Image: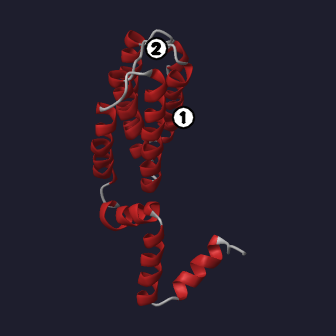
Amino acid sequence: MRVEKLSDIKKELRSLNSDTLVEVCLRLAKYKKDNKELLSYLLYDVDSPLAYAEEVKSSLQISFDGLSRSAYTSTKELRKILRLLSKHAKYTASKEVELELLLWFCTNFLEYADTRSSHKPLLTIFFRQLEKIKRILPKLHEDLQLDYSKSYNDVLESADVKMRFFNKKDYLL
């Protein structure tokens, strides 16, 4: 089976009438939950991506509240949270929303995860998110960079206090 190029699909969709286009969208949404979630975002939340980020945070907060104290189990749970967080950030296609969600994740990681653990996969999760934030920050508008860099520095300060194997100098902007 041959899959068409995106440009060809775009041309074909433009040629369809509105009723047929609605049917195609509904059929697409019916078969995969991710498609349905993306379609819901595009129809109802695209005007306020930061409000959508707040909804995502509140839905994922439950996962943080029930986070296991075992390093192995909490690592698996944190990866699941990150997978969902990344998926929703991808829906918005906004660097600001992605940064907001990553900072929220790091703050909650420091609050709920066992930060004194020496379990390398657990620590790596946190370190990778800091690196992502460091990469995204310069891509934002200058005013937003200033606001988010303050939040980022607060996360670094908190991590420096709470984590044994953390070198703040490695992550400074």
Residue at image coords 34%, 28%: 108
- The residues bearing labels 1 and 2 have C-alpha atoms spaced at a distance of 26 Å
The image shows residue 49, relative to residue 126, as above or below, that is below
Residue 124 image position (x, y, % from top left): 54, 24
Check the image and report above or below for 1 versus 130. Answer: below
User: Label 2, on which residue?
Assistant: 117
Q: Position of residue 46 (x, y in %)?
A: 35, 61
Q: Quadrant of residue 63?
A: top left
Q: Residue at x 34, y 32 (%)?
A: 147
Pointer 1 or 2: first along the chain: 2
For the residue pair 85 and 27, the one nearer the viewer reads as 27
Colour scheme in use: secondary structure
Instruction: Residue 150: give x, y in percent of width and height.
Output: 36, 26
Kindly state the secondary structure of the residue where label 1 is placed. Answer: helix
Quarter holding the N terminus is bottom right
- Answer with left or right where residue 134 lies relative to residue 88: right
Instruction: Please name the residue that numbered disc 1 is placed on.
Output: 135
